[in-house]
Amino acid sequence: MSNKSRSSRMRKNASAVKLVGSLVGVFRRAAGLTQVALAERVGVDEETIASIEQGRRTLKEDLAGLLDELLDTKGALGVALANMPEIDLFPRWVEQYIDLEQEALALSSFENQALPGLLQTPAYARAVFLNEVPALTEDVIEQRVAARIERQEILKRKVPPTATFILSEMTLMDRLGGDEVRHGQLRRLREWAVLPGITIQVMPGGRDFHAGLSGPFVLIETLDHQHLAYVEGQRKGWMIADPDEVSVLELKYAMLRSQALNPQETRDLLDLLLGER
């Protein structure tokens, strides 16, 4: 396994993330700066600084360097970051998929149990992990939420993958985390739905034919135009490379797209659920 692959599935220990975040806060206050002022000086938004100080987001190496220079901390943040313990982030059976997702040319996702991780808000992701049985610790939940949100950066890069998502209408009706979390998630979906390269379609309930009854799956087209699929069950995931098997799932996905609401109808439905129509 390459160092790049290894690093893509490792994450800093959650307690160490909080410690480094607390140091950022201590150094910021010692410099007489507010979170807003510091964010402006290093070119990030206030929420990024707040999330780092609260231990909800890992301090990145490049930002650590900027903060050390700006706050005159003699490289303390960079040293602390370099010596933070790491732990496995993803189960071994999902590692290959995560690596492929980060470099995919195209992603096509069908979900009927929960919203796709690439579209989840932090609050919704937290609600999903709170439903794990057996229960996860608070540190593990926060760590997994941060990892899930970090994966979404692929949709915001300069040349994002072409990404299509088909969502079961029932996932929009579920109240994971409560009404406020649901409303925030619907609002985020509406925002995602107009971004270039992203297509969101809802599969409405009440259909008399449904091509996705066998469960969720993701189709992946790699940079070298290899077509793969990923299917996940309760405690296991599978990468599928057999062209015949991938072809079956591609046929299912094409049928699902024809059965689902089109993108404009989906945006109209989201507006309706948000009370804006």
Image: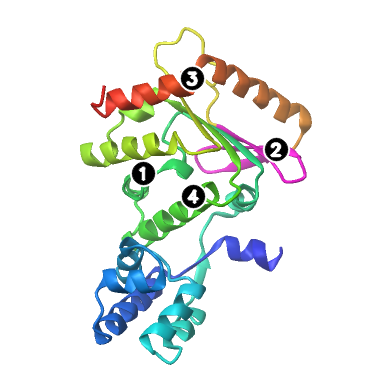
In the picture, measured across the screen, residue 223 lies left or right of residue 33, that is right
Q: Do the residues labelled 2 and 4 touch (CB within 8 Å)?
A: no
Residue at coordinates 47% horizontally, 7% vertically from top-left? 208
**Disc 2 versus disc 3: nearer the observer:** 3
3 or 1: tag closer to the N-terminus: 1
Q: Position of residue 6 (x, y in %)?
A: 63, 64
Q: Are marks 4 and 1 in contact (CB under 8 Å)?
A: no
3D distance between C-alphas at marks 3 and 4: 23 Å
Residue at coordinates 40% horizontally, 11% vertically from top-left? 206
3 or 4: tag closer to the N-terminus: 4
**Disc 3 versus disc 1: nearer the observer:** 3
Start and end of the magenta stretch? Answer: 217-240
The answer to whether residue 108 is magenta is: no
Label annotation for residue 228: 2
Tell me which corner region of the image, top left, top right, bottom left or bottom right, holds residue 273.
Answer: top left
Q: Where is residue 141 in the image (x, y as percent from the top left)?
A: 37, 56
Residue to which mark 1 is pinned: 128
> Of 160 and 173, which appears nearest the observer?
160
Q: What residue type is labelled 4?
A: Gln
Helix, strand or loop at label 3? It is: loop
Helix, strand or loop at label 1? It is: helix
Helix, strand or loop at label 2? It is: strand
Tell me which corner region of the image, top left, top right, bottom left or bottom right, holds residue 226.
Answer: top right
Tell me which corner region of the image, top left, top right, bottom left or bottom right, holds residue 221.
Answer: top right
3D distance between C-alphas at marks 2 and 4: 20 Å
Label annotation for residue 262: 3
Residue to which mark 4 is pinned: 152
> Of 130 and 62, which appears nearest the observer?
62
3D distance between C-alphas at marks 1 and 2: 26 Å
Q: Where is residue 185 in the image (x, y as percent from the top left)?
A: 33, 39
Q: In which quarter of the image is the C terminus?
A: top left
